[in-house]
């Protein structure tokens, strides 16, 4: 009896290929914004390194650009969506972000609520309530969600509501471990506003002592990526087996957001400008005050090192 054109061996190979196909084609792409600092209060719009007068235009341009990219599966925003936790900035940011035609997910930053001493602005609770749809299942300072197959996003609020500093509390760590335990072998991306490494304009920052317990937990449960913002520059490194990425600030020169393509074999990161060349150059000139302060605080660094860290490369590629 004839076995046909393929034969038994060919049929077996096709069956094996079909079984392996989901693993081979595993890939997703997300857009990443950070430190948007929306500010619409006229009495507060004073452009220095942060272009507050352009903040709504900058975010609208980013949203429009992302909506035109059909390859993007979802969007993440790693904090400081608002400037100084003002209620009018919350309304404006939600109005613009809700125009995204992709699901978007957020974590709170230190500027997304008002410090009690200021006497005006929103609380952390108000922020979390407003973005409830973008922090799914938020409880105990943590939310988690699977936006695509074989991926788990975890968002962390580790910000002290009194001081605005980081707070890796015992309860937060316990809640995080619960989410990680139930992961079921998915890729894990953790979003948090404050970086887990020191600020460093000369090279990649070293792991902060305060984040060591958090990092140990991430290693134990094989977290894939930790994504943060706050430093207003780019940094991409691997700490042990975990990718630690820092996104630049949308509000500052060079006004970029990132797209990240992740497959089972590699990670590709691309930078996207949202303003024209002339306006970007204006923003660069407005960095003068910030650069003077940094050079005073860190006398070992140079102006070029500061700019290089902010600009970074157009594309980054990493093997997994």
Image (spheres, grey):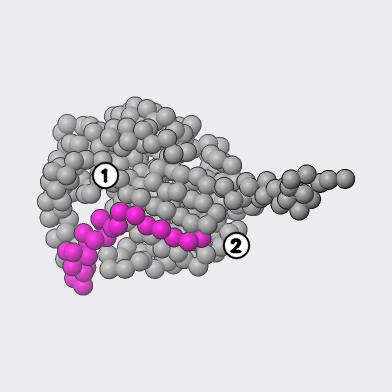
Residue beneath disc 2: 220
Counting from the top left corner in percent of width and height, residue 243 is at 46, 59
Residue at (60%, 62%) from the top-left corner?
Answer: 220
Judge by depth and name the residue closer to the eye, 280 or 227: 280
Q: In which quarter of the view is residue 53 placed?
A: top left
Whether residue 93 is visible, yes or no, is no
User: Under tag 2, what secondary structure?
Assistant: helix
* Residue 312 is one of the magenta-drawn residues: yes
Horizontal side of 263 relative to 11 (left or right) equals left
Task: Give the residues in magenta.
Answer: 298-320
Q: Residues within 10 Å of mark 1 (few under 14, many from 20)?
A: some
Q: How crowded is mark 2: few (under 14 residues within 10 Å), some or many (20 or more)?
A: few
Judge by depth and name the residue closer to the eye, 283 or 109: 283
- Circle nearer the N terminus (1, 2): 2
Q: Which of marks 1 and 2 is in front?
A: 1
Residue at (34%, 27%) from the top-left corner?
Answer: 95
Residue at (34%, 54%) from the top-left corner?
Answer: 315
Judge by depth and name the residue closer to the eye, 272 or 219: 272
- Real-space Cα distance between discs 1 and 2? 37 Å
* Residue 39 is one of the magenta-drawn residues: no
Judge by depth and name the residue closer to the eye, 36 or 17: 17
Q: In which quarter of the view is residue 31 placed?
A: top left
Counting from the top left corner in percent of width and height, residue 276 is at 18, 41
Residue at (23%, 49%) from the top-left corner?
Answer: 254
Say the numbered circle drawn on residue 273: 1
Q: Are marks 1 and 2 in contact (CB under 8 Å)?
A: no
């Amino acid at each position: 009896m004839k076995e046909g054109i393929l034969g038994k061996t060919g049929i077996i190979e096709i069956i094996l290929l079909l079984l392996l196909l989901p693993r081979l084609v595993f890939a997703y792409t997300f857009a990443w914004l950070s430190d948007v600092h929306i500010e619409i209060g006229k009495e507060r719009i004073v452009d220095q390194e942060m272009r507050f007068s352009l903040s709504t235009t900058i975010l609208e341009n980013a949203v429009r650009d992302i909506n035109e990219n059909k390859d993007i599966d979802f969007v993440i925003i790693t904090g400081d969506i608002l400037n100084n936790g003002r209620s009018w900035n919350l309304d404006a940011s939600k109005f613009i972000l809700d125009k995204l035609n992709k699901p978007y997910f957020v974590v709170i930053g230190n500027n997304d609520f008002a410090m009690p001493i200021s006497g005006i602005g929103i609380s952390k609770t108000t922020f979390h309530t407003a973005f409830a749809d973008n922090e799914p299942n938020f409880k105990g300072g943590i939310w988690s969600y699977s936006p695509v197959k074989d991926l788990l996003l975890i968002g962390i609020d580790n910000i002290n509501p009194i001081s605005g500093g980081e707070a890796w509390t015992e309860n937060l760590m316990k809640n995080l471990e619960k989410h990680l335990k139930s992961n079921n072998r998915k890729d894990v991306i953790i979003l948090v506003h404050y970086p887990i490494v020191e600020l460093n304009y000369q090279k990649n920052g070293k792991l902060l002592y305060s984040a060591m317990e958090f990092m140990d937990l991430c290693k134990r449960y094989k977290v894939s990526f930790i994504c943060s913002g706050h430093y207003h520059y780019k940094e991409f490194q691997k700490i042990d087996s975990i990718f630690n990425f820092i996104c630049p600030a949308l509000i500052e020169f060079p006004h970029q957001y990132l797209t990240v393509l992740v497959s089972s074999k590699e990670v590709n990161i691309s930078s996207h400008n949202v303003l024209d060349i002339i306006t970007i150059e204006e923003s660069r000139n407005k960095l003068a005050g910030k650069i003077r302060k940094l050079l005073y605080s860190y006398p070992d660094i140079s102006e070029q090192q500061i700019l290089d860290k902010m600009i970074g490369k157009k594309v980054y590629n990493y093997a997994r």
